[in-house]
Amino acid sequence: MNALSFPNTSSPGVSGSALSLATSAVAVAAPYPAQDAELGSRGMPGEGGLVAAFTCVAESAADIASRDALLDRAMSPNWRRKSSEKIRRGRRPAEGLAFVARDADGSVVGTVRLWNVAIGDEGRSALLLGPLAVAPSLKGAGIGSALMEHAVGEARRLGHGAIVLVGDAPYYARFGFSAEKTGTLAMPGPFEPHRLLALELRPGALTGAGGTLRPSGRKVRVAAGVTAAA
Ligand SMILES: CC(C)(COP(=O)(O)OP(=O)(O)OC[C@H]1O[C@@H](n2cnc3c(N)ncnc32)[C@H](O)[C@@H]1OP(=O)(O)O)[C@@H](O)C(=O)NCCC(=O)NCCS
């Protein structure tokens, strides 16, 4: 089952690498037992030390309204106009690669999706990751990292070769993303080249790749008279 759970403590000294161990562990469906709590994040804001666990699970249709509301809160107001949205609009996320983080009440507190893309004329396959967002009140609790670790792990498990994203290198470097292989890649609209980052899941998957990313995923099926939403 594609789910990971993370009990969060505010224990000092719990490092990012400890979190990585938790997130890269074999997927489990239930929260880790109490004795494993030290594998949780560096501390979710809250009182009294131990706070609610969060869980990374596959996004369901019932999550979509909450997820969109979270994005509106977490992202800059123009996130729907980004170049990445040109790839996402009217498409469905890559099969099995849309995730949410839930708090103990089941509320959506984080989101990440991956999308099928083809690169340039050659049409080499890759994934585009994004948006990644966490509820503003829970930033810094490890939810973004957990979602990233989970999403990258699932993409690897499903046999994908590479993931591309547009984002802040200082954040995504911790997951192995860099601009090393993206100098010959472009987004279908304005983008800052130093923010175009990639991670090869299969060594050499991006070697020699070049051109503009374009959507190659499944299209959203739109009922007559209804406007498509990405
Ligand atoms: C970026 C985001 C997803 C990170 O999620 P999170 O759950 O807060 O992150 P984590 O708790 O896993 O990691 C926190 C660490 O990342 C660092 N970090 C967070 N955002 C960062 C950024 N944009 N650039 C560099 N470092 C960043 C924090 O300083 C912290 O560092 P530390 O481990 O040295 O203390 C979240 O802050 C968010 O939703 N931001 C708004 C949406 C957004 O900008 N998304 C795209 C990101 S390019």
Image (cartoon, grey):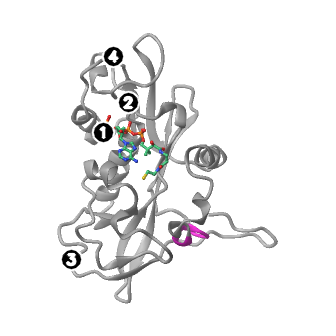
Q: Earlier in the sequence, mark 3 or mark 4?
A: 4
Which residue shows up at 33% across the image and 27% down it?
42
Q: Residues within 10 Å of mark 2 (few under 14, many from 20)?
A: many
Q: Residues within 10 Å of mark 3 (few under 14, many from 20)?
A: few
Q: Are marks 2 and 1 in contact (CB under 8 Å)?
A: yes
Gap in angstroms between the C-alphas marked 3 and 4? 44 Å
- In terms of secondary structure, where does tag 1 sit? helix
Q: Earlier in the sequence, mark 3 or mark 2?
A: 2
Residue at which label 4 appears: 34
Which residue shows up at 33% across the image and 60% down it?
158
Q: Nearer the viewer, mark 3 or mark 4?
A: 3
Q: Quadrant of residue 54?
A: top left
The answer, for residue 160, to whether it is visible in the render is: no
Residue at which label 2 appears: 6
Q: Give the amino acid at mark 2.
A: Phe
Instruction: Check the picture and name the quadrant holding the C terminus.
Output: bottom right
Instruction: Check the picture and name the quadrant holding the N terminus.
Output: top left
Bounds of the magenta segment: 86-91
Q: Give the amino acid at mark 3.
A: Thr
Residue at which label 3 appears: 207
Gap in angstroms between the C-alphas marked 4 and 1? 16 Å
Gap in angstroms between the C-alphas marked 2 and 4? 11 Å
Gap in angstroms between the C-alphas marked 2 and 1? 8 Å
Q: Earlier in the sequence, mark 1 or mark 3?
A: 1
Gap in angstroms between the C-alphas marked 3 and 2? 36 Å
